[in-house]
Image (cartoon, helix red, strand yellow):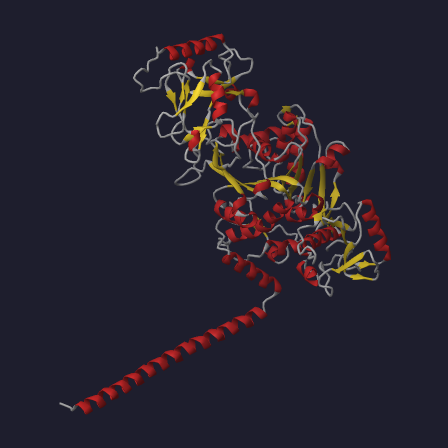
Amino acid sequence: MPSGRNREKMEQAKGVLLQAAMTSKELHKRVMEGGRVIKAETEKKAKQVQYEIFRREELIQLLVQRDAEESGGIRMSYKGQTPPWQIIRRVQPRRQKIEARLSVGSEEQQSGNLLVEGENLQAMVSLYKYRGQVDLVLTDPPYNTGEDFRYNDRWDEDPNDPDLGRLVPADDGSRHSKWLRFMTPRLWMMREMLKPSGILAICIDYRELFRLGMLLDQIFGEDNRLGIINWQKSYAPRNDHKRLSTATEYILVYAKAVDRSKTGLLPRTEAMNARYGSPDGDSRKWKPGDLTAPGAAKNPPMVYGVQSPFTGKLEYPSPGRCWTPGKQRLKKLLEAWGSTYIEVDIKDSRAKALLIDGAPKPGDEDFSPDHPVLKKARQKAEKIRDAGFWPEAHWRDQGQGTFGIKKYLEEVKQGIVPTTYWAEDEYELPFEIGSTSWAHAESGHSQTGINELDAIVGRGHGFETVKPLKLMKKIIQIWCQPNGIVMDPFAGSGTVAHAVLDLNQESDAQRRFILVEQGRPERGDPYARGLTAERVRRVISGDWASGARPPLAGGFRFTQLSKAVDADAVLALEREEMLDLLITSHWDQSERSGSHLRRLPAGAHRYLFATNSRGEGYFLVWNGPNKASVLNRDAFRAIAAEAKTGGLKPPFHVYARISTYSGPNIEFYQIPNRILEKLGFNEAVQPFSSGESAEGGDAE
C-alpha cells in the first residue's frame, strides 16, 4: 500500500486530471455553443439580407402577418394572399354612363335607387359618394360550386383586368384559395361602404362557410360577429349528397362596430297578441307578468317571503331569483288588496318578510285560514277580485296562484326579437342573436324564390337558385332602418331590390337600394339589363309574366361602368384617404393628441376638413399628385372665406405640399412624405400609369 505522502500525491494527480477533463469538456461545450451562436448570427444576417431585397408591399404583408401572430389571433394563410387594401389601392374608379332606356320612374324616383352594370369591386370603389353611407350590405355571392364562380388569375396583379376569367371547376385544387382571393378585397370594400352602425349579412352554403367565417373574423373582427342564421332552403329530402341531405344554408351577420349597431324587431303575430285578454274587465288587454328576476346571489335583501291575503301562505321568489320592485313598492302593491303589511323577521335565514299586520305565519300554533285576521284579509281580497278591474299586481288563479303583475299589450314593444330560442315576446335586455334556425315557414325556401322569379319574368331565366323574397325582407326589416340604404354587390336576379320596394309599400318606409351586377351581353351574361333590371321594372309596373299585380312605388337609375377612369373620383378618394391619415397622425404639442379634431362631412368644403376644441379650422390644399398643391395667396383667401362662413377663429391650420404665402393667421404643415408613401404616391412616378391621362381617358 502506498504511504500517506504517496496517497496524497495520487489524490492531487487525480484532481488535476479531473480538472483537466472538466476543462476540456467545458471548452468543448463552449466551442459548440459558440458555433451555434455564430451559426445563429450568420442566419440572422442572412435573414436581414433577405429582408433588404423584399419589395415594400411584401414587407408590409410580413409585418401584418407578424402582428397577427403576436396578437394571438388565428390568421388565414393561402396561396396568392395579398392584403386587401393593397389591391383596392390599384383599383381605378370608373365613370358611370346613365342608360336612360333601362331606367325606371321620374327623375326623383330614379335618384333614390341605383342599379350599376359592371364589375362589383370597381363599382364599389367608383361609388365614392356612398362610401360610409350604407346601412345594410345584403348579398349572395357565388358559392364556389364549380358552376357559378369565375376567376381571372391576372387579377392577382391587376384587379382592373376586364376579363371575367373562366369558371373554376369543382376539381380545381386551388379553387378555395382562388375564391378567398376573389372575396377578400370585395368584403373589405363592403365594410368600407357601411356606416359606423352598418351591418353585413352575407349568404353562403356549406362549401365555403368555414373559410368565409374566418375571413370575416379577420376583416370585421370576431367581436363584431352578430350571429349565424341557419335557414331552411328546402323542406323535403334532397338526393344531392351521398350521406346527408343539404336542406339548409347560412347567413353570416357582422357589424362594422358592434357597440354602434342595432337589431330591430319583427312584426308581432296574431297568435302572440291573442295571449292578451281582460279577465277582470280592464279596458286595456293584459297578460300575467313576472315580478321576479335572476340575481338572488347578488341581491340577498330582495329575497324574502310575502303573505297571500287569499291563503295566508308565504310566497318566495323561485330559487336563484329575487323580487324586482323595491320593498316599499312591493308593499304598496300588496296593500292594494285591502290589508296592511308589516316587515317581520321570521327567522328563515332571509330578509324580513312582508306579513299581513296581526296575522300568524305558516308554522305558528295559531295559524289557520280561519284565523280572524286572515279571514278578514281574505274577505277584502275576494271583494276586490269579484268587483273587477284588479290592481296592477294580482294573485293569479283567482287568488290561489302566485303574485304577478299585469303586462299590458300597448306597453309591449310592437315587435318580436328575431330569434327562436327565446320563448317570451317582451325583451328589455340588448339582443344577441347567437346561432339560430329559421324554418321555411319563417324565411321561405329556394323553390319559393324560383317560383317568384318565374311569376315575374317568366320561365327560362337560367337561375337555378334564388333566395326567397320573404328571407330578404326579414333581414332588411331587422337590420336596415326605414329610411336607410341597402346594398347588394352580387345582385343576381334583383331579389334585394324587390324586397326593399315591397317593404316600403307595406310599412310606408323610404328605404333605398344600390345593386351591382356584372353585365356582359357579348358573352351571354346579360343579367344586369336582361334579368336584374327587368325584374325590378316589372314589380314597379305590376306587369308580371303571370298576370297583372299591384304596382310597387319607386324607380331606379341604370348606369354602366365605362372604361374611362373617373379623375374626379380618383382625386376625391385620394383626398379622403389623406384626410383620414392626417386626422389620425396630427400631433399638436399643446394637446399631444389628434383625437380632439372633429372630422367634417366629406365634400362639404373645398379646403376645410376638421375643427378642434378651440374653434380653429384645419384645411387641406390637395390637387392630386400631378398638380401643385400650393398654399398661395388665392388659396389663403378661399380658406379665410370658409373659416368666416364656419365661424372659425385664427390661426388657420393648413396642410399643403409647399407654401408661398405666410401671415400671422397661418399655421402651415407640409403634407408628410410618409403620408404620400402610405397612399402609394411617389412624386417621380404617376400613380395610375396604365394608359389613362390625369383627366381620364379610355384605357385601351
Q: Is residue 548 left or right of residue 319?
A: right
Q: Considering the image in quadrants, where does the N terminus appear?
A: bottom left
Residue 216: x and y in percent read 54, 47
Residue 551: x and y in percent read 68, 25
Give the residue at x 55% y 35%: 467
Q: Considering the image in quadrants, where does the C terminus appear?
A: bottom right
Q: Is residue 459 above or below residue 692?
A: above
Asked which quadrant contains residue 302, the reply is top left
Residue 505: x and y in percent read 65, 26
Q: How many marks?
A: 0
Can residue 283 be seen here? The reply is yes
Give the residue at x 64% y 26%: 507
Viewer-proximal residue, 1 or 427? 1
Residue 660: x and y in percent read 83, 62
Can residue 146 be seen here? The reply is no
- Of all residues shown, which one is farthest toward the left? 1
Q: Is residue 297 above or below residue 87?
A: above
Viewer-proximal residue, 46 or 518? 46
Q: Is residue 6 left or right of residue 296?
A: left
Q: Is residue 671 above or below residue 439?
A: below
Viewer-proximal residue, 163 or 1? 1
Give the residue at x 81% y 58%: 631
Asked which quadrant contains residue 543, the reply is top right
